[in-house]
């Protein structure tokens, strides 16, 4: 089970997509994945995911187009990775609190997580 804090989510993505992510230095890769996904959500909130493009993402992250391609090859791949994280989180979160017997306590723990 992967804990769901930010660092572990980026590590999950880095490991899961190791065959596609060409950046091999782990620490910078984790930092840049965080930048990419934070910027993606900010841009999607501002203009919508469909309207944003990879050049916008480069501008928001400070990565060059070549640097960005070290992590994602397309917006479709970015959407796939987001979907994967959401699927992973929705699978893992209930398991984190399965040991909380009282339904109200479990709901409160889930909300606070």
Image: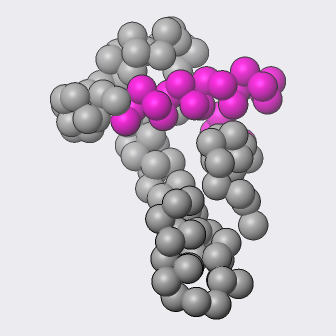
41, 78: nearer the viewer? 41
Residues in magenta, as a range = 17-41
Image location of residue 27, percent across then percent down: 78, 25
Total numbered labels: 0
30, 96: nearer the viewer? 96
Which corner quadrant of the image does residue 40 belong to? top left
60 on left or right of 34? left
Image location of residue 57, percent across then percent down: 39, 21
Residue displayed at 52% across by 88% down = 103
Residue displayed at 71% across by 57% down = 3
Q: Is residue 16 magenta?
A: no
Image location of residue 86, percent across then percent down: 48, 58
Which corner quadrant of the image does residue 17 belong to? top right
21, 13: nearer the viewer? 13
Q: Is residue 38 magenta?
A: yes
Q: Quadrant of the N terminus?
A: bottom right
39 on left or right of 28? left
Residue displayed at 64% across by 55% down = 4
């Amino acid at each position: 089970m992967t804990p769901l804090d930010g660092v572990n989510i980026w590590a999950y993505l880095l490991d899961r997509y190791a065959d596609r992510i060409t950046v091999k230095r782990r620490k910078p890769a984790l930092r840049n994945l965080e930048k990419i996904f934070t910027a993606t959500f900010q841009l999607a909130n501002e203009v919508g995911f469909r309207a944003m493009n990879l050049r916008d993402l480069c501008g928001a992250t400070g990565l060059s187009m070549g640097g960005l391609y070290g992590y994602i090859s397309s917006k479709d791949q970015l959407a796939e990775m987001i979907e994967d994280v959401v699927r992973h989180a929705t699978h893992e979160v209930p398991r984190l609190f399965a040991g909380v017997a009282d339904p109200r306590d479990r709901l409160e723990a889930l909300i606070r997580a």
